[in-house]
Image (spheres, rainbow, N blue to C red):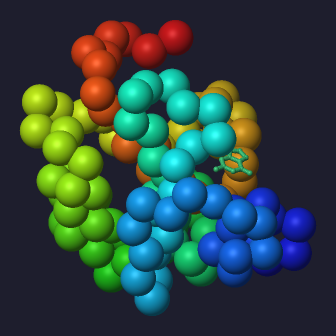
Amino acid sequence: MADCIFCKIAAKEIPSTVVYEDEQVLSFKDLEPQAPFHALVIPKRHVESVGALTAEDKDVIGHIMCEVIPAIARDNKLDKGFRVVANTGDEGGQTVKHLHFHVLGGRSMQWPPG
Ligand code: 5GP
Ligand code: ZN
């Protein structure tokens, strides 16, 4: 999608520090890390948010949740635990309108979030 920063990162038009990549999915380090480990995981195909997902996205979201995120956690030794967050929409705190899962680890997380 034109003017989408994460589409540009997926297309390698904007550089990023890649954590994981396959045909459908890219994971890269967050520019402003909120924890010692902070990566974003995106489907390469543009979809705005969790709220915009449809049955067509089942395979890629299942792949992200069941394979990609557990592999990232293993590879980055997040064995003590980690947090997966998908901010959704303006009140959900989503600033980039291309679906992404934050994977945060390496420190103790607080709850509830602000
Ligand atoms: P959101 O607030 O939408 O849940 O998260 C967007 C995240 O994207 C933020 O944590 C922000 O630091 C990160 N971000 C925004 N622009 C870029 C960028 O150009 N490169 C990288 N690596 N991260 C970005
Ligand atoms: Zn996009």
Residue 104 can be seen, yes or no: yes
Residue 79 in the image: above or below residue 7: above
The answer to whether 1 is drawn above or below residue 96 in the figure is below
Left/right of residue 86 with respect to residue 45 in the rendered view: left
Does 17 sit left or right of 83 as displayed? right
- Determine the residue positioned at 28% across, 74% down: 63
Residue at 11% x, 30% y is: 80
Q: Identify the residue at horizontal 69%, vertical 80% (top origin).
A: 11
Q: Residue furthest right?
A: 3
Q: Name the image quarter holding residue 36.
A: top left
Could you tell me residue 5's position as x and y percent? 78, 61
Quadrant including the N terminus? bottom right
The picture places residue 23, in percent across and down from the top left corner, at: 45, 88
Q: Is residue 79 left or right of residue 95?
A: left
Q: Give x and y (percent) for residue 50.
A: 50, 55
Q: Position of residue 7 (x, y in %)?
A: 71, 71
